[in-house]
Image: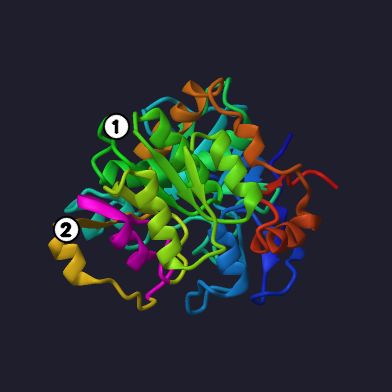
């Protein structure tokens, strides 16, 4: 079947407004190293909500197509297209891909960190009215550029799992890697009970943590966190002092050896520092912009804490995320994270529902009615 010259997509033209279903162009041919895929599944991320609402915004970003967690079936490939492990990619293969990177900036070459690429971004930085147009998940077809780091997916990893690995799961694994992992028996606090918080709870449990505490809301998500390995859950009904006291009680008064902010809510930084044990580590993952956040630096100094930032992840984290989901597919019911699939026409409602915390991980199948 010939590859179409355009694709149906849900386009964001104004923050907070419903997406519009439009036809946007597809490149006429694949560059060397590129591919055109038929999108099989897209899972929504909290970043999509922030972009839709305008809480996260870039000058001149609109119009754009949301969605940066997706998998697809290859419909066409350019010469020399291989995945991150050098395996040939052919028509009919099922692939996932990590953000496109330029390969020649300071971040890519000197720091050797794809996360630091000055031009990285996929599904949240590229306008839909400029070449290569269709690069994001809320579309029937995608152009996967040469710089997008591609991975051939194993057969025993479901589409929804593999899609979520493209951001949510790899972000969590990257954060744990930045922290140096989990020491056996360490107390771990997860701030946030969304998809990232629930996955982080599972990672902490499988990594040998002693006590795992998940903080968040609503109650349905805290129940989900318990099924994914939380020993203790703490709701948001009380104030910060109540939450800190609950963590201290759960850890025998010692505090948390590792705290991960996967919520990005106001005040989580100060709470994390108070919850941390002497010599503890705090990893900031959930913040979405340059918003001032009070941190008690004297407490950081007195506890000799390490405070680290962690931004998403690279293709190595993506590969490990797919493997994590595959290896622990009988340990955790990953499908509990995902809602029933809907089509592009219902994507606006799914994003709005996610913004109200009604869904953990909405799923969009672009080919559904």
Helix, strand or loop under label 1: loop
Quarter-wise, where is residue 301 in the image? bottom left
Helix, strand or loop under label 2: loop
Instruction: Classify 367 as above or below 210.
Output: below
Q: Would residue 95 be counted in the magenta stretch?
A: no
- Total numbered badges shown on the rendered structure: 2
40 and 277: which is toward the camera: 277
Q: Is residue 146 visible?
A: no
Residue at 63% x, 55% y is 218
Image coordinates for residue 330, horizontal then vertical, percent: 56, 20
21 sits to left or right of 33: right
Image coordinates for residue 323, horizontal then vertical, percent: 45, 27
Q: Quadrant of the N terminus?
A: top right
**Residue wearing tag 1:** 185
333 sits to left or right of 191: right
Q: Are marks 1 and 2 in contact (CB under 8 Å)?
A: no
Image coordinates for residue 229, horizontal then vertical, percent: 49, 34
Instruction: Classify 186 as above or below 138.
Output: above
Residue at 43% x, 45% y is 213
249 sits to left or right of 237: left
Q: Which residues are magenta?
A: 267-290
Tell me how far mark 1 sits from mark 2, CA to CA: 20 Å
Residue at 17% x, 70% y is 298
**How is colour applied across the structure in the image?**
rainbow
325 and 141: which is toward the camera: 325
Mark 2 nearby-residue class (10 Å; few <14, some 14–19, many ≥20): some
210 and 310: which is toward the camera: 210
Q: Would residue 273 be counted in the magenta stretch?
A: yes
Image coordinates for residue 261, horizontal then vertical, percent: 39, 56
Residue at 52% x, 61% y is 124
**Residue wearing tag 2:** 303
Among the two numbered marks 1 and 2 on one chain, the one whose residue lies closer to the N terminus? 1
């Amino acid at each position: 079947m010939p590859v179409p010259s355009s694709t149906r997509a849900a386009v964001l033209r104004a923050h907070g407004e419903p997406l519009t279903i439009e036809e946007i162009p597809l490149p006429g041919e694949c560059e060397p190293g590129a591919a055109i895929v038929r999108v099989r599944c897209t899972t929504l991320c909290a970043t999509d909500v922030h972009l839709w609402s305008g809480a996260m915004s870039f000058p001149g970003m609109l119009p754009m197509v949301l969605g940066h967690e997706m998998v697809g079936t290859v419909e066409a490939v350019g010469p020399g297209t291989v995945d991150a492990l050098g395996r040939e990619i052919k028509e009919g293969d099922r692939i996932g891909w990590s953000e496109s990177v330029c390969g020649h900036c300071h971040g890519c070459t000197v720091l050797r960190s794809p996360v630091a690429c000055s031009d990285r971004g996929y599904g949240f930085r590229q306008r839909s009215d400029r070449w290569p147009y269709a690069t994001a998940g809320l579309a029937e077809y995608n152009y996967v550029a040469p710089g997008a780091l591609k991975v051939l997916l194993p057969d025993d990893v479901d589409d929804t799992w593999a899609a979520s690995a493209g951001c949510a799961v790899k972000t969590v694994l990257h954060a744990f890697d930045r922290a140096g992992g989990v020491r056996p028996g360490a107390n771990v606090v997860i701030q946030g009970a969304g998809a990232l918080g629930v996955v982080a709870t599972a990672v902490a449990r499988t990594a040998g943590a002693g006590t795992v505490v998940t903080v968040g809301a609503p109650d349905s998500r805290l129940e989900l966190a318990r099924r994914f390995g939380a020993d203790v859950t703490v709701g948001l009904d009380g104030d910060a002092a109540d939450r800190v006291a609950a963590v201290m009680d759960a850890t025998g008064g010692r505090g948390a050896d590792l705290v991960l902010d996967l919520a990005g809510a106001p005040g989580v930084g100060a709470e994390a520092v108070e919850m941390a044990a002497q010599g503890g580590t705090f990893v900031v993952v959930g913040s979405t912009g340059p918003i001032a956040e009070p941190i008690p630096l004297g407490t950081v100094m007195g506890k000799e804490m390490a405070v680290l930032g962690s931004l998403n992840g690279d293709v190595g984290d993506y590969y490990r995320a797919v493997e994590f989901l595959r290896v622990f597919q009988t340990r955790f019911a990953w499908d509990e994270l995902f809602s029933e699939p809907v089509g592009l026409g219902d994507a606006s409602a799914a994003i709005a529902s996610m913004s109200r915390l009604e869904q953990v991980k909405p799923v969009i199948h672009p080919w559904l009615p």
